[in-house]
Amino acid sequence: MQKSLNIRIGQGIDVHAFGPGDHLMLGGIRVPHDQGVEAHSDGDVVIHALCDAMLGALALGDIGRHFPPSDPQWKDADSRAFLRHCNGLLGEHGWRVGNADITVICERPKVGPHAEAMRAQLADDLGIDSGDIGIKATTSEKLGFTGRGEGIAAQAVVLLVSRA
């Protein structure tokens, strides 16, 4: 019988259309913007993608399974609660985040000025060093829904390491 590795990798993607509002939540940080997002919760694409990556690494489904948009208790919910819940699941299964790499895809708002605050917030919620979280952004060169300014997306990759 082959011994399993003490690491797991997961990836996640999240997308939200822009809608009425004056800010976005990105990585647990309020980012001023001339629009909000259409979402059941606070629509934090960074946290949603990260949660999907964490859950996927453990083969525990996706964020919609754990926090269904059909459940009214999650209406306007703070996505940081989702992240803390997912991190608790990791611990229960004997894992922790080793590092995470997240890319935000949008033409606007500019993510760079908020990246350090996002890293610090995510690290605090996960109980890890902010140096273990990468936040970067890219545009889609004015192509597709993000390029037309219709919404925002994020991709996340996470490496889990065994607590054993």
Image (cartoon, rainbow, N blue to C red):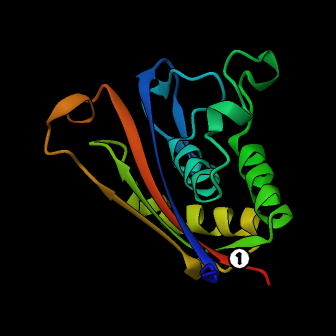
Quadrant for the C terminus in the image: bottom right
Mark 1: few, some, or many residues within 10 Å (few <14, many ≥20)? some
Amino acid at the residue labelled 1: Ile
Location of residue 49 in the rendering, given as x and y in whole percent from the top left corner:
52, 47
Residue in the picture at 20% in, 45% down: 140
Asked if residue 84 lies left or right of residue 1, the reply is right
Location of residue 121 in the rendering, given as x and y in whole percent from the top left corner:
67, 62
Q: Is residue 94 visible?
A: yes
Q: Is residue 148 visible?
A: no
Asked if residue 97 lies left or right of residue 131, the reply is right
Location of residue 4 in the rendering, given as x and y in whole percent from the top left corner:
62, 79
Seen from the viewer's position, the closer of residues 17 and 115 is 17
| Element at label 1 | loop
Residue in the picture at 78% in, 54% down: 84
Residue in the picture at 49% in, 17% down: 20
Seen from the viewer's position, the closer of residues 69 and 8 is 8
Q: Is residue 129 above or below residue 13?
A: below
Please name the residue that numbered disc 1 is placed on: 128
